[in-house]
Amino acid sequence: MAQPYAATRQAIEAQQVEKRFGSVLAVENASFTIEPGSFISIVGPSGCGKSTLLRMIAGLIPKTTGSLMVHGSEVTGPRGDVGVMFQKPTLLDWKTVIENVLLPTKLKGRVTDADRRRAVELLHLVGLQDFAHAFPRHLSGGMQQRVALARLLNVGTDILLLDEPFGALDEFTREHLNVELSRIVAEVNTTSVFVTHNIAEAIFLADKVFVMTPRPGRLAAIVDVPFEKPRDISLLLTPEFNALVARVRNIFATGKDL
Ligand SMILES: Nc1ncnc2c1ncn2[C@@H]1O[C@H](COP(=O)(O)OP(=O)(O)OP(=O)(O)O)[C@@H](O)[C@H]1O
């Protein structure tokens, strides 16, 4: 359900945003709004500008033209209310799991007992409560991404930008983590923007799917996902789900919605 202030203030608002890298038009004329608390997937084939769009929202690269606002203010650089997670977990190998989760707290100052309790809560949330004192090298790739997610949640950002966070993992782990991610972001009530080139994954997670097509990177359609949440993996086998997958695939092929 939308937040009370959704009517007046969107989490993210883009108007005619473009990004050029020299002669390459990476993102063309993107306009959209993202409501607080919603889950958006950006899906499209390789090179269509998904990561570029996400990096602009994160303030990691500047837009070339247009207006891009987060919580009502123009994005001019990285900001505290937006957190980003990439395919590689970037954990500190010489720190334990809980020390990695507490890293953002430590960068701000002294770590209190309350901070430690919160870190333990976050480890419960991502299912790693028994691994607080393990080192990252003793964890699987999926577990390391869970630590990265707990660390990101510890920053307390309102908006999570997730760039293929499970892209390097096997299909089974990935499906399982998608279910977990869905539960976790609903529990902490963040706005989430998730980049993937996997159509089923995009639909399974999202309230809306932004479909991008390449050359130049264009936001071809915004598709509403009608399935109730929380969602179970069995949804993937239903005709309704597969019809939506076919619809998104058709947008890739034709650049147009049905
Ligand atoms: N720093 C850069 N300098 C020059 N060109 C870039 C840069 N970053 C991206 N591009 C170009 O912009 C276009 C979009 O790239 P982007 O990485 O956003 O696509 P993507 O959809 O995320 O692809 P993938 O799924 O393969 O990660 C591509 O043509 C890419 O070569």
Image (spheres, grey):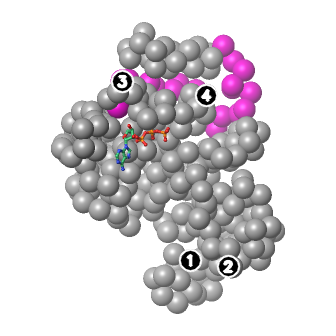
Residue tagged 3: 220
Q: Which comes sooner in the sequence, label 3 or label 1?
A: 1
**Disc 1 or 4, which lies upstream in sequence?**
1
Q: Are marks 2 and 1 in contact (CB under 8 Å)?
A: yes
Going by the numbered disc 2, the residue's amino acid type is Lys
User: Ligand 1 within 8 A of label 3's CB?
Assistant: no
For disc 4, the marked residue is 200
**Residue 103 badge:** 1
> Magenta region: which residues?
217-239
Of mark 2 and mark 1, the one earlier in the sequence is 2
Residue at mark 3 to residue at mark 1: CA–CA distance: 39 Å
Query: What residue sits right under mark 2 in the picture?
Result: 95
Position of 80 compared to 249: left or right? left
Identity, as a three-letter code, of the amino acid under mark 3: Ala
Report the residue that reaches farthest toward the front.
Answer: 23
Q: Position of residue 178 (x, y in %)?
A: 65, 42
Category of crowding for the residue at label 1, using alpha-carbon neighbours closer than 10 angstroms: few (below 14), some (14–19), many (at least 20) = many
- Element under disc 4: helix
Q: Is residue 226 left or right of residue 51?
A: right
Tag 1: amino acid: Leu
- Cα gap from disc 2 to disc 4, whole angstroms: 36 Å
- Label 1 secondary element: helix
